[in-house]
Amino acid sequence: MKAMILAAGFGKRLRPLTEHTPKPLLEVRGKPLIVHHLEALSRVGIKEVVINTAWLGEKLEAYLGDGSQYGLDIAWSRETEPLETGGGICQALALLGSEPFLLVNGDVWTNYPFEQLLQRSLEENHLAHLVLVPNPEHNLSGDYCFARQYSGDEGEVLSGVLAGPVPHKQREGRQTYTFSGISVMDPQLFAASISGEAFPLRDVLAPAFRAGHISGELYRGEWCDVGTLDRLDALNQQ
């Protein structure tokens, strides 16, 4: 299985650090954030990684090179203008091929065991499998919920078909979770998309949710969206 790391974002909330350093190269616990991902992917046997770039992409390429120092072969999907998450993935499909791929947001910190996704095959008619996490303080309303309610204890490993975004007026009594930015995607999810156009990932997820073609699991381990200076500082102080 190939992997893709989304690394084209500007990181406005991390300014002034990101004015001269691409967000994935900001250091967390002694090494650039994206290097943690590359090392973790290499450890579980991933050999080919696609990385998309836009803002300060040349610095990212200069630092990581061809990936050989991590035991990887890195292919670069360069965006002259940021294409957002969905558009960035769509443009990179020519490098990813026709088989499902592992997708990781370049601005999250986690100890999620990627081997779990390598061992998972998308079920028939499923186009994506999303890793969810308990809602952090900055996203208490969550993103998605499971299609059926679960009542197990806090240690239960939840998995199953996901419902789409739940309107706030319908969230009472339904447990929602936050999308971690880690997933397995089938390129067929983007069959109707046009390469080179900018659009968010949620645009292609929405019809798949309605058709019941997206599964998910809940991960309760370490995870952080490194989206602000405060969160970055907190990670480095732990």
Image (spheres, rainbow, N blue to C red):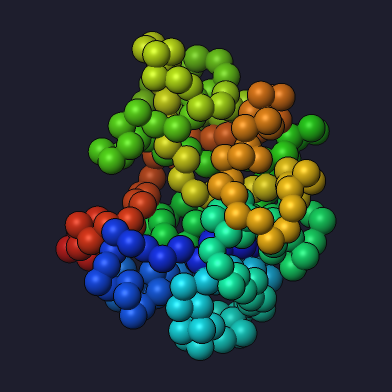
User: What residue is drawn where x is 66% and y is 56%?
Assistant: 197
Q: Nearer the viewer, residue 42 or 26?
A: 26
Asked if residue 207 shows in the view, the reply is yes
Q: Position of residue 34 (x, y in %)?
A: 45, 69
132 shown above or below 89: above
- Name the image quarter holding residue 31: bottom left
- Left/right placement of residue 124 relative to residue 39 reads right
- Left/right placement of residue 232 relative to residue 172 reads left
User: What residue is drawn where x is 73% and y is 58%?
Assistant: 195
Q: Position of residue 63 (x, y in %)?
A: 47, 86
Quadrant for the C terminus in the image:
bottom left
220 shown above or below 88: above
Asked if residue 215 shows in the view, the reply is no
Q: Position of residue 142 (x, y in %)?
A: 39, 31
Quadrant for the N terminus in the image:
bottom right
Total numbered circles:
0
Q: Position of residue 47 (x, y in %)?
A: 67, 71
- Left/right placement of residue 146 relative to residue 72 reads left
138 shown above or below 51: above
- Name the image quarter holding residue 88: bottom right
User: What residue is drawn where x is 71% and y is 24%?
Assistant: 211
User: What residue is drawn where x is 36% and y is 52%?
Assistant: 225
- Left/right placement of residue 144 relative to residue 212 reads left
